[in-house]
Amino acid sequence: MAITTTETKKITLALQGGGSHGAFTWGVLDRLLEEDRLVIEGISGTSAGAMNAVVLASGYEMNGKEGARKALYDFWRAISLKGAFSPYHSGWFNPLGADWSFLALWFDVISQLFSPYQLNPSDINPLRDMIEETIDFEKLRQCGKIRLFISATNVNTNHLHIFTNKQITVDVLMASACLPYMHQAVQIDGEYFWDGGFMGNPVLEPLVRRCETSDTIIVQVNPTFRQELPRFAVDIADRLNEVTFNSSLMREIRSYFDVTRMIERGTIKDPRIERAYFHIIPIAPEFHHLGVRSKLDTSWVLLKRLFDMGRNQADMWLTNHFDDIGKRTTLDLEEWTPTEIQ
C-alpha cells in the first residue's frame, strides 16, 4: 500500500532502550521528522530511547524539525567521540568488534565480581557531562512543544516512575539509562533509580491517556522473536534481557488492544474510553547478527550503519502504512498474543 494522502496526522512515539542500538531509533526519527505530514505530540522513552526523546524535543524547541534532526546527529556523533577509548569500541585496536574484544570480555567478568560502587566509587560517567553540555534543560522544562514521558525504576519501591517535561533534568536521563552492573543508582529527591526498562520499555499509558492522538508508533530495538536457542552464557543473558525488557510492553499492548476491540464491537460504549491504535517500526533483519556487547560499541561506523537501517525501516513503514494512521492498528498482534494450550 503506497502513501496516497496529503493529510497531516498526529502521532505519539514509544522508544525502546538498547544502548548503542538506539542509533537505529535515531535513523527512524530522522526519517519521521523529514515527513511534513506527521506531527509528534508526545514521546515515551526509556534509557537510550529517553536520550533520543529528550534530544529530539530539545532540538525541536530551538529550531523545529530541522533543529531536532541536527540535535540528534550532534548527540550521536558526540557519543561516538566520547566512547573512543571504551573497551567495547570497535576500531583499529579492536578490529573484530565488541563481541570479540578481549578487553570487553575482561570487563564483563570484572563487572560481575565487583559492583560499580567498588570499581567506580566517584561514579564518573562521561555521558553525564556530554548531556549537560548539549541539552538546555531549563528551556526544555519551560516550553514543552512535545510532551515527554521518561521512565525510571525506583530501586526502593519496585515502582515505575514517569518524569514529565517540567521534571526532566540530567539526573532523570541518567536514571532512565542506569544499568545497575555498570553505574551506581541515581538519587533524585531522596529516592534511588535504575534503568526504566525493567518496568516499562517503554511505558504506553501516558501516551494513550494523556495525549489526544489515538496512534502510537513503537520503535523497537529489542527483538521479540529469535529463531535460535541461546546456548552460551552471554547469549542467554542477552535473551533474558530482551525478554524482561519486552514483557511489560507486550502486556500493555494486549490490554489496550482488547479495549479497542471491545469498543469497535460495541461491547464498551462509554465515550470517555477511547480506542488506541498501535504501530511498530521493527528492527532490521541485520540486528539478529549483532551480539550483546555491540550495545556498548560506540564506533561511528556501527552507529551510522544502525542509523541507515533505521531510516530504511521507517521509510518502508511510511510507504506501507501512512494511510492507516488514525484508522487501524498495523502491529502484527500474533507476535504479541499469548499462546493458548490446546
Image: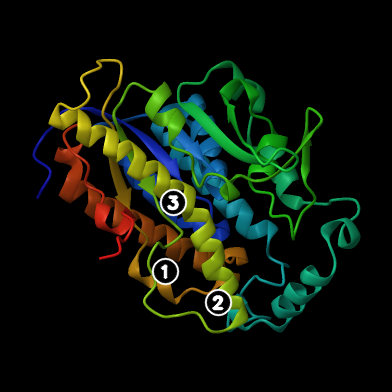
User: Could you say where residue 34 lies in the image, as x and y percent from the top left?
Assistant: 32, 40
Residue 280 spot, x, y in % from top left:
31, 49
Of the numbered discs 3 and 2, the one sitting upstream in the chain is 3
For the C terminus, which image quadrant? bottom left
Provide the secondary structure element on which disc 1 rests. Answer: helix
Instruction: Report the front residue among 197 and 219.
Output: 197
Instruction: Name the colouring of the figure.
Output: rainbow
Looking at the picture, does residue 161 appear above or below residue 182? above
Find disc 2 in the rendering and name its residue.
Answer: 235
The residue lying at 28 percent from left, 23 percent from top is 274
Nearer to the camera, 91 or 152: 152
Q: Quadrant of residue 240?
A: bottom right
Give the residue at mark 1.
287
Residue type beneath disc 3: Thr
| Mark 3 → mark 2, Cα distance in angstroms | 23 Å
Packing grade of label 2 (10 A; few <14, some 14-19, many >=20) is some
Q: Could you tell me residue 268's position as x and y percent? A: 22, 24
Looking at the picture, does residue 207 appear above or below residue 131? Answer: above
Residue 231 appears in view:
yes
Determine which residue is flagged by label 3: 25
Question: Percent x, y for residue 23?
Answer: 49, 56
Q: In what element is the residue under mark 2?
A: helix
Is residue 272 toward the left or the right of residue 152 in the image?
left
What amino acid is found at the position of numbered circle 1 in the picture? Phe
Does dot 3 land on a helix, a strand or a loop? helix
**What whole-number distance in Å separates the C-alpha atoms at marks 1 and 3?**
13 Å
Q: Residue at 57% of width from left, 54% of height from top?
A: 77
